[in-house]
Amino acid sequence: MELAKALQALQKLQENRHAYAHAQGLLTLDSATGAPRGSAHARNVTLGILSERAYQIFVNDDTRALLLELAGQKDRLTPAQARQVELLTRELNDLTRIPMEEVVAYTQLTNQARDCWVAAKEHNDYPSFKPYVEKLVEFNRRFAGYKDASRPAYNVLLDDYEKGLDMGILDGFFEALRRDIVPLLALVKDRPVEDGFLHGHFDKARQAVLAGDVMDLMGLDRRFFALDTSEHPFTMSFHRDDVRITTHYHEDSVASSLYSVIHEGGHALYDHNIAEEYQYTCLADGASMGLHESQSRFYENILGRSEAFAEFLLPRLRVLFPSQLEGVSPRQFYRAVNKAQPSLIRTEADELTYSLHVMVRYELEKQLFAGQLTAGDLPEAWNALYQEYLGVDVPDDTHGVLQDTHWSGGMFGYFPTYALGSAYSAQILHAMEKDLRVEEWVRKGELGPITEWLREKIHRHGMMLDPGKLLEEACGEPFSAKYYVAYLTRKMKDVYDL
Amino acid sequence: MELAKALQALQKLQENRHAYAHAQGLLTLDSATGAPRGSAHARNVTLGILSERAYQIFVNDDTRALLLELAGQKDRLTPAQARQVELLTRELNDLTRIPMEEVVAYTQLTNQARDCWVAAKEHNDYPSFKPYVEKLVEFNRRFAGYKDASRPAYNVLLDDYEKGLDMGILDGFFEALRRDIVPLLALVKDRPVEDGFLHGHFDKARQAVLAGDVMDLMGLDRRFFALDTSEHPFTMSFHRDDVRITTHYHEDSVASSLYSVIHEGGHALYDHNIAEEYQYTCLADGASMGLHESQSRFYENILGRSEAFAEFLLPRLRVLFPSQLEGVSPRQFYRAVNKAQPSLIRTEADELTYSLHVMVRYELEKQLFAGQLTAGDLPEAWNALYQEYLGVDVPDDTHGVLQDTHWSGGMFGYFPTYALGSAYSAQILHAMEKDLRVEEWVRKGELGPITEWLREKIHRHGMMLDPGKLLEEACGEPFSAKYYVAYLTRKMKDVYDL
């Protein structure tokens, strides 16, 4: 085949895949936002049909021939084209081993599981959700086996979300973290921090105004970014000019939605800043889950939970919530939003204990896939680990094993990327501070130079590089957990006046 | 082919078509609700790809062979199956004459036109929209020619929206209406009706509560119906258990969103009440645009603008807007929401002048398709007809030719169904009153028996019957405009104490 024609076919293929991903993504977004509760049936039928077609247009002999042809002419491709061929070939190889009927059945299953999970969480009814967990684990184990039967299934899944990751690396990473976090937590957990003012009554309409203000502050131009509400906040992108974030307003907490919006806004900026030339190709995504999470956590924690940000934000917050925040100083606000306290809910956890929440899930997933634990054992095992790692009693499954949406979507091996992302973000801060006076920009509420640094070093590259390589190029050295440990130690000493 | 297999293929075909319609519909809904303004590009690409595929799965030799096969075994089909074969064959014949590239180009064009129209309306910029009108008329003229070159293009379009309708029927219908409406309007238009209390300040959040209350009152169960906001209210259904309506809150008017929700709610009930067995088939739609509109107008005008409804609603309205509605009696409210006054905006028009707004559009469309008028002439011609029919001066195109979304979606020939729908609804009321004490149920706020009558006589049948036949069976006689004229006369005499 002529090269120009082959490249045209490659572009067409990717545009087609993008269209189905867009439609399927929108159906999923809709199911979590605007769709009425009882509407699952038609959506499942539609998703089944679309996912079958999406599979067919990619997994076929023409695609294989096309990719082989282009791989054979690798020297004549641009780096971006070569990378597309590399990633698509990898994906095709992975998928080819999975029969299409299983892909379709899996899509329908996750869709049903998500609806079930919403109801199960609402009614504290883990037993209704248990069969889905069983089936989802089974599917994932089988899929992992199709991809690489020579490795433990969980390693294959970890590598899916974070290229190069495995249990060996994670065991070491978490062990190092635990070594430093647990003593730090012991030091601070009984020291009082006043945070009652964060938990008054905060009108939802005013929280929505705050969310809009925060979007403006972050440069989330409403022409390209939209905000909606859902049970669990998330980000979904259809194109760099069509990025959606969601939040959830809790009337008894001002920090919850505030930091959700900042967090999802960090994801959203990453997606939006991916180079124009990569749009409609497989390169138009974050380099990895961990890298993506590093951006959301960078904005949420490193910027959003800094004292400098509290100094900028508080006068504005007080306009919306004058009585609730009367007499609160920036330092008090800063200390309150960084209060380290063992708790039940991962998404509400402070930076220090956050990784312990992730470790619980990592441990359970490892055991599930090693066959040492069944879906039926999960609630009890969950509660035991929360007692062991965090010292808290889980009152019910709604606040325990049912709290996260991930497993209902079949996402096993995803949670560890949250902790990795936090560690990446601390290392990124270290590198950025060589170029920028980060704290000063934050204190002025001018995040533009910070976002521009991230765009240049990380965002714009999309999936051009594997995550380890990208981080190394951005930071000038390979990943190391030491920056995260140092950051947490420094911050906790500051917050707690140690 | 074996009959059972052919029927299975028929079902599969319709499920596939439903899936693409669902995805395309959701993209369109999203573009009018949650999507950021600048997101059109990716959506256009996706819609182009999906519409091409939707066309391909239907318009092909297999479909033709299948429908021929089933038509040949007509005696062995259920009435519903036979009707599916009839309607699909008709559609296939219509579509086959249109080249696929034109269908795809048209879908993309309407998508772009809609985005352009939103901006043009906002900035009073008809010239930017004009090229789209030109192209859309040209496309529609060509499409009509493909379908039936022997008839005037506009007749073919009218028949598309309302089986059996043509300019001859409409000229007569509108002439009859004009004969009675114009003298009636002359009688009442200078008689004062106090309606200032409808135009105070009405908080959007409270209007949203009202919208929810109205949905409850109408039996729009939130498990299956959802409400969102958009520039122009509309209804979209993906399944009987997934029906969406939108509204637009104007802070200076309580009646606007209130009656929008009742109106769209009427559409929504029709869609929801279509028989379960017709779901995922081409029968799962209203019998015609006019019949659909008769249901929305029945709830909005015949029920919602009755004095009995004012008696029921007002005490509830006063809880939400106590100061604005202080001292207003049900009769005052009833008179205010029925005030007949020549005005600029169709969707805000009273029942009496509404048909005159439709006549303007009918006249312009007729002339556009007869080649007596160009897209460039439209604003001036629009303004002249508003002066002639309604006696009002149009201040700008935003309040004139740009006010409606329909033309941006390529919908020419649709407007007349609005006036027909109103006429149908008056005839339906006449028939219903033989069985039910309509006014008494409304006064109690119990709409269940009324909806049940409509479900039984009209809704559940979906597209089983052509509109004329369905109306005749529901009402016991063929369509006649006399019930509408009598209804309007009676009502205006009551409102104006004539």
Image (cartoon, coloured by chain):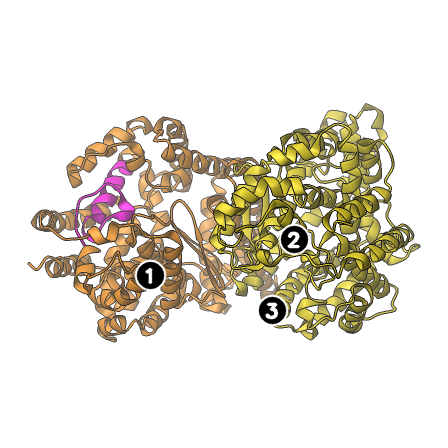
Chain colours: A orange, B yellow
Residue range in magenta is A338-366
The numbered disc on residue A320 is 1
- Please give the residue where the numbered disc 3 appears in the rendered image: B122
Q: CA distance from mark 1 to mark 3?
A: 30 Å
- Judged from the image, the secondary structure of the residue bearing numbered disc 2 is helix
Depth-wise, is mark 2 or mark 3 nearer the camera? 2
Vertical comparison of A432 with B313: above or below: below
Packing grade of label 3 (10 A; few <14, some 14-19, many >=20) is few
Residue type indicated by callout 1: Leu
Vertical comparison of A471 with B445: above or below: below
Q: Which residue appears at 15% of the width and 50% of the height?
A: A176
The numbered disc on residue B444 is none
Do the residues indicated by labels 2 and 3 lie within the same chain of the protein? yes
Q: Position of residue B58 (x, y in %)?
A: 72, 44
Residues B152 and B188: in front is B188
Do the residues indicated by labels 1 and 3 lie within the same chain of the protein? no
- Judged from the image, the secondary structure of the residue bearing numbered disc 1 is helix
Q: CA distance from mark 2 to mark 1?
A: 38 Å
Q: CA distance from mark 2 to mark 3?
A: 29 Å
The numbered disc on residue B336 is 2
Do the residues indicated by labels 2 and 1 lie within the same chain of the protein? no
Q: Which residue appears at 34% of the width and 31% of the height?
A: A124
Judge whether residue A341 is colored magenta: yes
Packing grade of label 1 (10 A; few <14, some 14-19, many >=20) is some
Q: Earlier in the sequence, mark 2 or mark 3?
A: 3
- Judged from the image, the secondary structure of the residue bearing numbered disc 3 is helix
Vertical comparison of A140 with B5: above or below: below
User: Dividing the picture into quarters, in which one does residue B311 lie?
Assistant: top right
Q: Is residue A448 visible?
A: yes
Q: Which residue appears at 54% of the width and 59% of the height?
A: B200
Residues A441 and B86: in front is A441
